[in-house]
Image: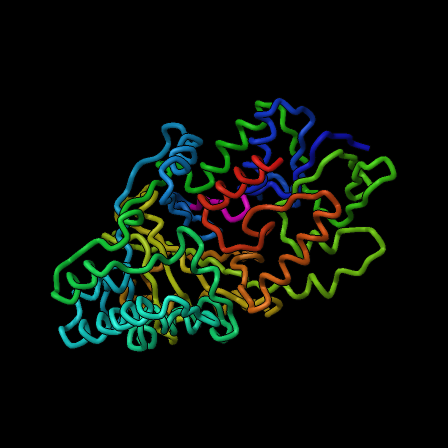
Amino acid sequence: MLKFNTCILGGGWAGLLVAERIAETNIKDIALIEANQPGELGGLLRTEEIDGFTFDCGGPHLLFSRDERILSKITEILKSNYSKRIRNNYVYYRDQFIPYPFENGVYRLNPEERVKIVKGIIDRMLYIAGNEDWKPAHFLEWITGFFGDYMANEYLIPYNEKIWKRPLNKLAADWVFSPGRLPFPELENMLLTVAGIPNTGYKEQAYFYYPNTGGIFSLFNSLYEKLSLNGVKSIKGEKVVRVKINSNNTFSINNKIITKKIISTIPLPELLLSLDDGSNYEGLAGKFDYNSVVVVGVAIRGKTPNQTTVYVPDPKIIFHRYTWMSSLVPPKEQDNSNIIAEVTVPKGQEIDFENIVKRVITGLLDMDVIEDESSVLFTRAWCNKYGYPIYSLNHNEVRREAMKILDNYGIKSVGRWGSWHYWNTDMVYKAVEEIYMLR
């Protein structure tokens, strides 16, 4: 039996941050329990380099935050291996690239469309100002209630139906009120855009930070190496399938590891199913909904445009967004470029990789992103089983029930999947800080 003071379940971004916090308290005998084998580490921060092209296999992770302190802490992990970049994001709408956020970029549309979009938003601003008790009952009502019917139907509804693949009136609305997620547009910017005057929109998202080399895995790897130097153990290839409380109030993990404390970052349903106390948690675990995300990498013969990420609401195109990885990490051949496109797949649905890749190429051709199929040098596809947590209408109730069970065990659970929240890199950092302060 291996024995530790503290075991952290899951060795992704959240797990590493928890380990760093605990190590700072001079607690010894800390172990990360990671299901993946060496060479497969990183979770959603995994990167692969193929033939001189860099691909972030878990999707793009552009580092930005409203909280400058947290952003500074994250970039410190990268030491000098990062730079500040301009975020050239667009929405592909009616064969045009409209600057993101869409409501600020509609100055590029004709005056009639500008008025329809902005009038809808201002009408809703006025309504909410006069009805302070108004609260959206579900996500669809939030979209129409904040942005008006015209923008909702033209952009937000088709885009969100594509990414979430659930009826939008069956999704909760409370997650959009979380700090850092989907801020409400400013009136001054609305007036500028209806007048046809360019404006940047949400200023905290106008710039981002990103590693100069190594892709987003550099962030993971830099922290991982620091923890190794500080004596944090890493047990790889050990999927957590059994957690039991012993008579002396210690925990046993997979009948192999003994620990005094557990902090979990693995998906909540998997943790529930691992609890060995004679209870059946299958019903509760099954209530957690999610989408997997297939990331398709495409290496292209041709130069990189002045774009970072493009959002694609068109329902005929399979991917909801794509990112020019070559704008983040230039390939070795300057006349080449590469993209990662993201396709969500509902929980439990079979994944047809060949069909997905084929439809991604078709979509890129239809958008004139690539000239013809001969421009494609090669493709790769990666599946991230846990891509996006789904905010079902009973999301909070299900989370509370799970967290109550874990509290009874004395287990803290944190991270995107440990908390079952759609959190960015900075929000996971903040949540880990808060958990640490509560300990």
| 402 lies left or right of 157 | right
Work out whether 18 lies above or below 86.
above
Could you say which quadrant of the image residue 27 lies in?
A: top right
Task: Give the quarter of the figure containing the N terminus.
Answer: top right
150 or 292, nearer to the observer: 150
| 195 lies left or right of 34 | left
Residue 234: percent from left, percent from top: 65, 33
Let me know if residue 48 is in the magenta part.
Answer: yes
* Residue under the point 76% across and 34% down: 259
Residue 44: percent from left, percent from top: 51, 49
356 or 415, nearer to the observer: 415
Span of residues in magenta: 42-50
Work out whether 170 lies above or below 419.
below
Could you say which quadrant of the image residue 119 lies in?
A: bottom left
| 16 lies left or right of 48 | right
- Residue 79 visible in the current orientation: yes
Numbered circles on residues, count:
0
* Residue under the point 48% across and 71% down: 138
* Residue under the point 35% across and 57% down: 183
Residue 78: percent from left, percent from top: 42, 32
Let me know if residue 166 is in the magenta part.
Answer: no
- Residue 359 visible in the current orientation: no
240 or 418, nearer to the observer: 418
Work out whether 125 lies above or below 6.
below
Task: Give the quarter of the figure containing the C terminus.
Answer: top right
Could you say which quadrant of the image residue 298 lies in?
A: bottom left
